[in-house]
Image (cartoon, grey):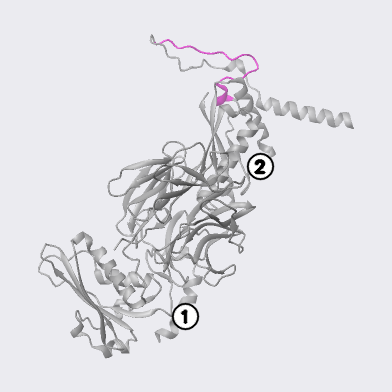
Amino acid sequence: MKRIFLPVLLIVLSWLPLGAACAQGLDIGLVVGNDSALPIAVVPMPYQGSGTAPGADVGSIIRADLNRSGQFNSLPLEKIVEQPTRGSEIKFPTWRVLRQDFVVVGRVLDDADGGYRVEYELYDVAKQQRLLGLALGGRAQGMRDVAHQIADQIYEKILGVRGAFWTSIAYVTATGTSPHIQYALMVADSDGFNPQTVVRSSEPLLSPAWSPDRRKLAYVSFERGNSTIYVQELTTGAREVLASFRGINGAPAFSPDGRRLALTLSKTGNPEIYVMDLASKALTQVTNHYSIDTEAVWTPDGQSLIFTSDRAGKPQVYQVPAGGGEPVRLSFEGQSNARATVSFDGKKIAMAQGNGNIYRIAVLDRSFGGTGRWQTLSPGNLDESPSFAPNASMLLYATKEGHRGVLYAVSADGRVRQRLVLADGDVREPAWSPFRQR
Amino acid sequence: MKTASRLMIAASVCLAMAACSHKVKEQPPVDNGNNGMNGATTGGIPEAGKYGPGDLDTDACLRQRVVYFDFDQDTLKPEFQATIACHAKYLRDRPEARMTLEGNADERGTREYNLGLGERRGNAVSAALGSSGQTSVVSYGEEKPVCLDSNEDCWAKNRRVEIVYTAK
């Protein structure tokens, strides 16, 4: 039954205007489902200690993480008819009837140091074989982190690819109209929970960019009256001005080794791309053209920059050696393409593609050589600022619903799309953090 | 025929100039910012035919401080020539005056690209004003919208350069 109806549901949902979901007050939910995703049952993980249960529901966080990836289809809570908490209690025929490939059981216990400990097991239903059996500890405030780590372990065990749930996102919020707009640069968990303010200003903030060690954010602030590039240490809040030249100081991007910063400066009269050596602050000019050249990002090998230029009339995406050279155009589909994000393996480049007044996220897959294959990942109308997850399984992007900017997470194949829950009203410019070092 | 059309052109030029003219007699006393230690205040009286700071609040042309643009364009439209002309005259009349040209874009297109576009618009106005030593350009891109709807009416209001006097 479920398998039959799901494709129909998908079609219906994919044609629903996004505003409809908003008007109904839905803050969360899959906008588009994926019928080829792996079925997995994450059984609720009850608190079995003697004190107060933690506020975070570990099982439901894992379920939501796996669903959001597009790779898994978590069994909805109401269909979880049995609630084993350890492997020995699992009745495999039940989960076979429910057509589940995997089942996860676990429980939350008190830990010796006053925190909690989650013990969980992952089973392959067909083989009745235990794939994982682990315990993770955490304080009450850290239970969402514990849940994301479990989701990462399950994801990696089954798919062989590192999970990216226990990561962070940076984004900018803004409320009001000129001249009374308040801006904030925020950092939150990858699912939008636990938002923290990095900097707040009555002048625009934009273009957050993570350092590869995820300790710092570079961003553009207008607090001095003109655009200025800052780099800020997240734990201490200490920050430094990196660029405050005449004209535009924009689009910072750390190199993969963290030693250089690509940026846009218009000190010569129009926007050009430069690379700054962060130790010496020495600048190397990369582009030299009367057009707008901006939004540089690095290829994973640190050898090239991929950037936006309107040298052919409309904005398009180009690649240039990081030391300078002749740019090569990459985007030949759509009237305009801009603000690229590159997957960790350099094979996929996502960008904001414009056709008339419709802007969608499109991805150029260069795995197969030639000029690459294109796929559209989002429905429009004003989708922008794509940012790959560090494992490239998902992207974040920003769009507008009514007057409100919102963020969506979309799976890399475009099949699963979900709005992120964020406390602040108007949200834009998501930047997915690198992995934690392990 | 030729004479008639010349007269028409002359008349329209006169009208355009009249639109930018100002009434020196109505000039209120101006605070030059020279508030002396003893509390005395001095006022400058503009020369005949020249703008004074008070005109910024009273002159119909000088009060126009916003120049609007077409989508993805930085070309000055003919309807803003008069506005540009009177502000250019003001800068010539008052060498001590300074202005910031704040370039803005609508929400379509990416944010950093729109910073570039806003700067192009600011530069276009600056070039038309002709007094580059007195003007500076700041681009806010699409970060300071005055209107939040996603339609052409609203986008047209946001594609603008705002003339902000930092010294009168």
Is residue A61 rendered to the left or right of residue B121? Answer: left
Is residue A28 rendered to the left or right of residue A57? Answer: right
Exactly how many numbered labels are in the figure? Answer: 2
Q: Residue at x 39, y 70 (%)?
A: A69
Depth check: give the residue in front, A22 or B134: B134
> Where residue A222 appears, x then y in whole percent?
44, 40
Q: Which amino acid type corresponds to the residue marked 1 in the rendered image?
A: Pro
- Examine the image and state in which quarter residue B132 appears: top right
- Examine the image and state in which quarter residue A21 appears: bottom left
> Where residue A393 appears, x then y in whole percent?
41, 69
Q: Say which element carries label 2.
A: loop
Is residue A411 rendered to the left or right of residue B11? Answer: left
Depth check: give the residue in front, A20 or B48: B48
Image height check: is B48 above or below A5?
Answer: above
Q: Chain of mark 2?
A: B
Q: For residue A411, which numbered disc appears in the image? A: none
Q: Residue at x 41, y 56 (%)?
A: A256
Q: Which residue is disc 2 drawn over?
A: B75
Q: Residue furthest right?
A: B1
Q: Which residue is disc 1 drawn over?
A: A7
Whether the residues at callouts 2 and 1 have beta carbons within 8 Å, the answer is no
**Magenta part of the protein: which range?**
B39-58
Does B48 lie within the magenta span?
yes
- Examine the image and state in which quarter residue B134 appears: top right
Report whether residue B40 is seen: yes
